Amino acid sequence: MADHYEVLGVAHDATPDEIKKAYRRLARELHPDVNPGAEASERFKSVTHAYDVLSDPKQRQQYDLGGQGGFSGQGFSGFGDIFETFFGAGQTTRGPRSRRERGQDALIRVEVGLEEVIFGTHRDIEVDTAIVCGTCHGSCCQPGTSPVTCDICNGTGSIQRSVRSLLGNVMTSSPCGTCRGYGTVIATPCVTCQGQGRVRARRTVPVDIPAGVDTGVRLQMPGSGEAGPAGGPNGDLYLEIKVKNHEVFSRNGDDLLCSLDVAMTDAILGTSTTIPALDGDVEVELRAGLQSGEILTVKDRGVTKLRGTGRGDLKIGVQVVTPTKLSTKERDLIQQFAASKKPHAPELGHFQQGLFARLRDRFLG
Ligand SMILES: [Zn+2]
Ligand SMILES: [Zn+2]
């Protein structure tokens, strides 16, 4: 058998205090609750036995004189007490757990139109969640009754057993199976909610969707989620926004984008036109000599900014349309026009610096 001092890792002249400290450290490391391995279990037994002997001045003296020590009487059966002394009953008296818990958060997806996003909108959202039971108001009991103290665990929620092992009595604690650790038993559960304190229900939640939200934005509504069990507080409700695509207008940040086909003659001579924007008509001046790829900006007719103040702009991309079918008379007029101009050879330019790049940069820049 290994030397008791070596087992505890202390010198032969160690003080009782040093022995105690060494044991406390090793027991923490090797206790079967912490370290369930077979090897740890064996070492735990040796360590505890060594401490049993060396902590008792009479047995220590006997051991030092060459005796085995410890196996008689007190030593082993006293283990439970030793363990209690060090670790107290702390682990075994956590008390009953509460039935009340916070409810879960709920997530609802909401589709809104682009036109609704400009100024914000109001929705009545149908939500299917747990709500507090209207019969027992979360108490889980039939009206007029209340939970009774569990007489198996006396309301502590846990059962302590003294397990007798080679080392003596070890106290173990486990949740009470009768009350499932709550310390109380609901003898007459509420019939409406089957003792859960909450029921599933569909309800309508009025929601103000702020202007400027975009796809992916989540709006948090504190306390509008699932009711918790046994009258526990509600979780939060999250609305995840999806903005529907519009057939004409698209969005770049707070700006609204669209394109406008302009007749060749209008582009040459200039005119004004009315654009039916999402928030009403907009008068747009088309100057004489308008080019394809030009962007007309109408200030403050975009989306209201979600953060900050004011609105983005409405940006209109111009596309000059060349006529493809001409009457004989029109063809004559164009030919007369062409004849009046100096001959003009087509000019080459770099593709990337040409029309397509200009369009993209102006729209998105
Ligand atoms: Zn109920
Ligand atoms: Zn119980």
Image (cartoon, rainbow, N blue to C red):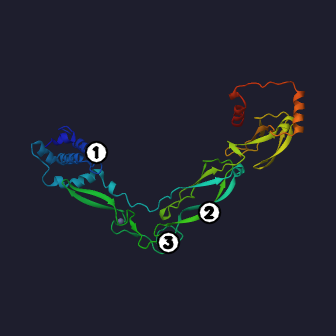
What residue is shown at x 76% (from left), y 24% (from top)?
Answer: 347
Amino acid residing under circle 1? Glu
Whole-percent x and y of residue 270? 86, 37
Q: Indicate which disc, 2 or 3, sits on the residue closer to the N terminus.
A: 3
Q: Which residue is mark 2?
A: 204
What residue is shown at x 68% (from left), y 52% (from top)?
Answer: 113
What residue is shown at x 41% (from left), y 72% (from top)?
Answer: 187
What residue is shown at x 9% (from left), y 43% (from top)?
Answer: 66
Which quarter of the image is occupied by the N terminus?
top left
Q: Which residue is mark 1?
A: 29
Whole-percent x and y of residue 200? 53, 65
Q: Residue reaching furthest left?
A: 66
Q: Which residue is mark 3?
A: 192
Amino acid residing under circle 2? Thr
Q: CA distance from mark 2 to mark 3?
A: 21 Å
Is residue 170 shown above or below 311?
below
Is residue 164 shown above or below 268?
below
